[in-house]
Image (cartoon, rainbow, N blue to C red):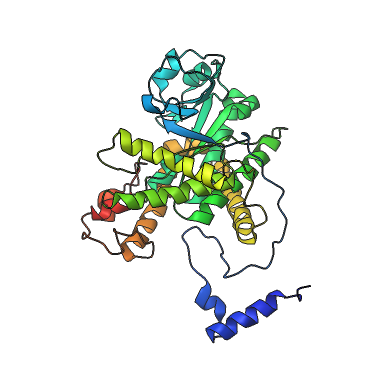
Amino acid sequence: MFASVTLQDWENLIKKQLKNDDIYAILTKENLEGIVVKPYYGGTSASLKNLPKVEVSTHLVAKYQDDLQDHAYAFLLEHNVEGLSEKSLFIANKELSEHIKAEDDNRYFSLIDVFENNKINENLGKELLGKSFDRNICVDVSLYQNAGASITQQLAFALGKAKDLAEIFGKEIYSKLVFRFAVGGNYFFEMAKIRAFKLLFNQLSKEYGLDEVPYIFAETSLRNKAVNDEENNLIRSTLELSAAMIAGADAVFTNDFKINNSNALSEEISYKQQIVLAYESIINVFEDAANGSYYVENITQQFAENAWQMFLEIENSGGFAENLQSGVIAKMIYKQAIAEQQWVEEGKIKLIGVNLYPKLEKTKSVEDLYSAKEIKAVRWAEMFE
């Protein structure tokens, strides 16, 4: 039998090794998310139940190529393809959705967001809901991550968009939604983001007398990718895919690791990162692999609590669509994005080949990259390219 070891015992050992009694001052790291991260954990305040996902096994989604037709079972489609059978098809093009014929032996998921020009396109929503798709409408928050929104903001915005949709189309829409998230490079934070959204959306659905589990489509971020040393992008996106699968995303997609000069080979290599993770590590089949991790459990709860509070504040000020139209959402993202970019500039956020062992000097300022009046995707590395 092992001797019982208390948290105080561990703390005393750390003090001895660091030769300093103020270990929290040495080991605590600040972050831009407003999340309290402890140097070590000895338990959780509350044990979370297993957070389920919709799909039994995470869909590994490839951008459609003829050469992958026999090797991939889920495709992101931007144009019509004849003769596909027993596939899961993610429709990413509004015009395609109008003309595609749903075959009985395929499954269809919409990646089309009905928020257009800062308001909801009700006619488009009705057209999509009339389709024989497994999931008809996408709540896309990937742009916000790529534009520099915090994790708390992304979660609150996803809830706000879902709430606005339910007010127009009814609560039944909650079983017809796909939530599209971009997953960044802060490994455990991104894991907690997806897990927190499962808690949050389930809580929102209970306000309508439902008990829904969100369908989550997770893709790799563009924000931390660079034009130079593209192989580093592969490492970054591998970690992002891993975080998404472990957190229990229902589908994952890899954006091309080549920012410029994308080609069929680079798209195939990017997709096959998913294959390696799924078949070598088997992390695409677990329902909630992070459950029980003291650290992940703690930050999951913090993100959920912070995002719910922000969601309520947005609702009390008129709802997501109204705040989007008034420019409040853009200003919120702008403030967070420039703070994050300044951390990159100062080296607090490190990107190998960009601000760590860099080959180039800074070429653009924060003012060149960001605007408080426009939500647009900006890569950190653009400042140095």
Coordinates of residue 95 in the picture (x, y in percent):
39, 18
Q: Is residue 295 above or below residue 18?
A: above
Q: Pick the residue in front: 121 or 36.
A: 36
Taking the image as shown, residue 332 lies to the left or right of residue 37, namely left
- Compared across the picture, whether 358 is left or right of 69 comes to left
Residue 302 rendering spot, x and y as whole percentages = 60, 56
The spot of residue 34 in percent (x, y) is 52, 60
From the viewer's side, name the closer residue of 2 and 102: 2
165 vs 36, nearest the viewer:
36
Location of residue 96 by image quarter: top left
| Residue 271 percent location from the top left of the image | 42, 38
Write the residue at 32% across / 47% down: 371
Residue 94: quadrant of the picture: top left
Which residue does the image show at 63% across and 35% down from the upper left?
56
Q: Is residue 111 visible?
A: no
Instruction: Look at the picture and state if 355 lies above or below 274.
Output: below
Q: Quadrant of residue 43?
A: bottom right
The quarter in which the N terminus is drawn is bottom right
Residue at position x 71%, y 35% in the image:
211
Q: Is residue 222 visible?
A: yes
